[in-house]
Image (cartoon, rainbow, N blue to C red):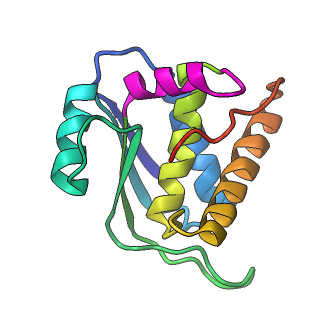
Amino acid sequence: MSIDVNNESGTEVDEQAVLDIARYALARMRIHPLSELSVIVVDAEAMEQLHIQWMDLPGPTDVMSFPMDELRPPSKDDDEPPQGLLGDIVLCPEVAAKQGAEAPTQHSMDEELQLLTVHGVLHLLGYDHEEPDEKAEMFGLQAAIVDGWRAERGLTGPSPAPTVS
């Protein structure tokens, strides 16, 4: 798996954890091991510009996903996953810090960025949360991936609750 993490935000983030959870999520979703992903960490001003340009919405947001090859997880265990360029995930640590602090299970900015990374990966794979059934499926997968990753690393305490909208 080729995953690049580029921190342009000026904020110190746990880039290794972002890389590790992205790799874990892609493996869990059975994405081809030679697929490529880019994760970019930006400040609130850059995120706001992207949010306005691509979503026509004001203010910065937490995570944005820009799919490239529209890869999807294989439908059966014995199907060979396709290889390709997944796309870009853009994260904003300023928004993540605020969301983590305001979440019912308060957690750190880095924990929120880990959750948002998984959220972004799922968006790249075609998952969405516009409809209640889609939201239940996506957030269920998101929680299972974050919980599995945390369990493998022996991290204790509650997993971050979904704070993305």
- 51 shown above or below 12: below
| Quarter of the image where one finds residue 61 | top left
- Residue at 52% x, 41% y: name it: 116
Q: Please tell me how many numbered marks the rendered image carries.
A: 0
Nearest the viewer among 137 and 31 is: 137
Instruction: Verify whether residue 105 appears in magenta.
Output: yes
- Counting from the top left corner in percent of width and height, residue 69 is at 35, 72
- Residue at 80% x, 37% y: name it: 152
- Asked if one can make out residue 143 in the rendered structure from this viewpoint, the answer is yes
Magenta-tinted stretch: 92-106
Q: Main secondary structure of the magenta part?
A: helix
- 115 shown above or below 119: above
- Asked if one can make out residue 1 in the rendered structure from this viewpoint, the answer is no
- 8 shown above or below 47: above
- Counting from the top left corner in percent of width and height, residue 24 is at 64, 48
- Residue at 70% x, 43% y: name it: 146
Question: Does 64 sit left or right of 76 as displayed?
Answer: left
Question: Does 35 sit left or right of 45 as displayed?
Answer: right
Question: Does 97 sit left or right of 49 as displayed?
Answer: right
Instruction: Verify whether residue 102 appears in magenta.
Output: yes
- Counting from the top left corner in percent of width and height, residue 123 is at 47, 60
| Quarter of the image where one finds residue 31 | bottom right
- Counting from the top left corner in percent of width and height, residue 36 is at 41, 57
Nearest the viewer among 6 and 143 is: 143
